[in-house]
Amino acid sequence: MGSLLFTCVCGGFRFLGSADDRPYAAHFLPEQQWYPFWDAVDAAVESSGPSAREKADACMALRAWPARSLWQCPRCGALYVEDPQGGTHRFLPESDAVPRELFLPEAPPEPAGKPAAEAPEPGAPGLGQVEACVRLGEEAYDRMYDASSSSAATACYSDAKEAFRDAIRLAREQGIEERALALEARLEHIKAVFRSQFT
């Protein structure tokens, strides 16, 4: 679990920090920083040195770009916007019709030429699919410790998170709630390790 940032004025929701993938949080760049940010991306891709260290430094410089935060209360729909000094300002929805999950991501487009995912074999046991994802996640987690650069460790971390999320989703689809809860706890542990040792 993350640390408490603040509680919504409505009293119905607590916003947590120091944790990944919170569906009520987002980051934004002001318009004046949008193109300079992409100039920095281009520089990192095209102009970083040939060594793994130089490429990792370019990636870390992008991760340090000064984005600000947004939060939306899933109970009342209030939007909190962070100002340049770190203060937060609350904005209320015009009506109850405003969605309470404005920050849900869109599905990314499929890369060109990527083959369609194979459907699971008929009769394949749900738990077997879950544990296959868990194995992939644990292997990625192990590789994180052997990574030769911070960017490589971040890539392994991303693979581990994706595999554990798939395992949790499959466990819930199969009605294996106890296993899903255990996997969520394991994923939180992996996130905490990455934040404390690799960032």
Image (cartoon, rainbow, N blue to C red):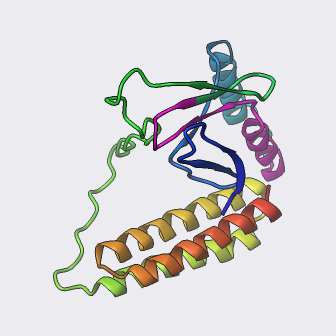
Q: Is residue 118 magenta?
A: no
Residue at 64%, 18% in the rendered image: 30
The segment highlighted magenta reads 51-79
Where, quadrant-wise, is the N terminus in this rendering? bottom right
The mark tally for this picture is: 0
List x then y, in percent, for residue 53: 83, 50
To which quarter of the image does residue 94 belong? top left
- Image coordinates of residue 188 in percent, x first then y, are 63, 68
Residue in view at x 68 percent, y 22 percent:
39
Image vertical order of residue 90 relative to residue 58, above or below: above
Does residue 43 appear to the left or right of 20 in the view shown?
right
Q: Is residue 57 left or right of residue 42?
A: right
Q: Is residue 163 above or below residue 158?
A: below
Q: In this view, which residue lies farthest toward the top?
A: 32
Name the quarter where the C terminus is drawn: bottom right
The verdict on residue 59 being magenta is yes
Q: Quadrant of residue 145?
A: bottom right
**Residue nearer the viewer, 99 or 76:** 76
- Report x, y in % for residue 131: 43, 84
Q: Give x and y (percent) for residue 198.
A: 79, 60
Task: Using residue 159 as the reference point, say whether residue 177 is left or right of it.
Answer: left
Query: Who's the residue at 30% across and 83% down the image?
Result: 126
Q: Nearer the viewer, residue 195 or 154?
A: 195
